[in-house]
Amino acid sequence: MSRTFAQDPSAATALELVRDLQARLVAALESCAAELGVESRFRSVEWLRDEGRHGGGRRYQAPEGPVFDRASVNVSQVHYDDLPDKRLASATALSAIVHPAHPSAPSMHIHVSWTHMRDGQGYWRVMGDLNPSHPIDEDTARFEGKLRAAAGESYEGGMAQGARYFWIPALERTRGVAHYYLEAYRTEDRAADLALARRMGEAIIDVYAELLERRLSLATADDEARARQREYHTLYLFQVLSLDRGTTSGLLVHDQNDIGIMGSLPSQVDAALLQSWAAKVPAPQDELVQGLVEALCPGRTPGLAQVDAEAKQRLAQVVRQHYRTHPEALALQAAGDVVPPTVANHATVGD
């Protein structure tokens, strides 16, 4: 069966937007690699929800190499046009993560999505965050300045909500250095809301490409810098798999895109460091952390671990089973100002 798309005009408009942003980001990343004389063509991968009957998605993945440790740029649209009893009519999203290979180049996450409910209401979710292993004040200021100019009146609230959402209580720090997050955003002017989503998406992509190109031109990093980067990548995996509601929701609602949902994970982490954080989280999250460690290092002493496709599948199963066994632990996950019903009920689209 071929892939189908949501019939509502607002979903079609949102799909056009996120596809535009996807193409813009992929082109920018490929251009950054070309500036270094490296060909880094992104590979297209399609996945289907219920064999395409309820939509699906397409992601572009960078080859691992001298420029990108991991980079995945996903667009998806899931809909339930044939199931009128569902509260969720459709969800259309861009979700992307870039982990550069060079330690001085920051990671970046962007998410722009439109959720359309059966009653005709809809809302936007917009996220953009800068996540360096080696923070550089100049880069942080540049990133925040571009977001402020694009966000207008939503900037202060978006940054405050981002700081709350990306806070890691066990480690008493945020995931990165700058986090913008609008959740369940809508006004009476749908055209203005759409324009804000586009403006923010373009600003995040453009300023990140500028920062990335600048930092990728630096000299080769030493072992100490790479060790620090690996520690940060471990923290990133810890935050995504123990706190991020979007990731958890995607894993709980279906198992048809586990590799895509896990596309945000870096290629290598320190499982021994991850294991040490089990004592810092409240029960039953200590069980989750230990399960993640065992998924990364099955049958061996925790140490450096490759996050390959097989490991991603194991990690997905650990997260899924943990919250099915301990649904009360969902209350321990990150939250901004509100938790939309689609997230609370695990009905959101998987990246």
Image (cartoon, rainbow, N blue to C red):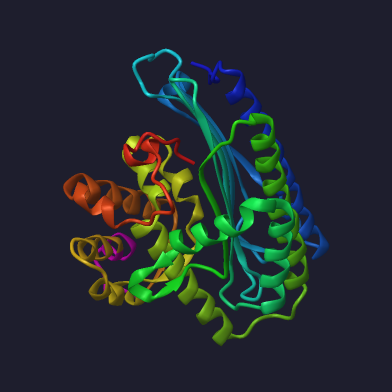
Residue at 23% over, 75% down: 279
Q: Position of residue 140 (x, y in %)?
A: 66, 71
Magenta stretch bounds: 293-303
Instruction: Indicate left or right for 178 with 280 as reference.
Output: right
Which of 77 and 229 lies nearest the eye of the viewer?
77
Q: Position of residue 153 (x, y in %)?
A: 66, 52
Assign the magenta stretch its main secondary structure. Answer: loop
Q: Is residue 46 visible?
A: no
> Where is 253 relative to 313, above or below?
above
> Where is 178 relative to 331, above or below?
below
Q: Quadrant of residue 251?
A: top left
Residue at 33% over, 54% down: 315
Q: Quadrant of residue 8?
A: top right
Instruction: Indicate left or right for 128 with 291 as reference.
Output: right
Q: Is residue 192 visible?
A: yes
> Where is 307 relative to 135, above or below?
above
Residue at 65% over, 42% down: 197
How many labels, in total? 0
Residue at 53% over, 68% down: 176
Instruction: Indicate left or right for 329 with 101 as reference.
Output: left
Q: Position of residue 131 (x, y in %)?
A: 57, 67
Residue 99: in magenta span? no
Q: Quadrant of residue 100?
A: bottom right
Instruction: Indicate left or right for 36 with 117 as reference.
Output: right
Residue 299: in magenta span? yes
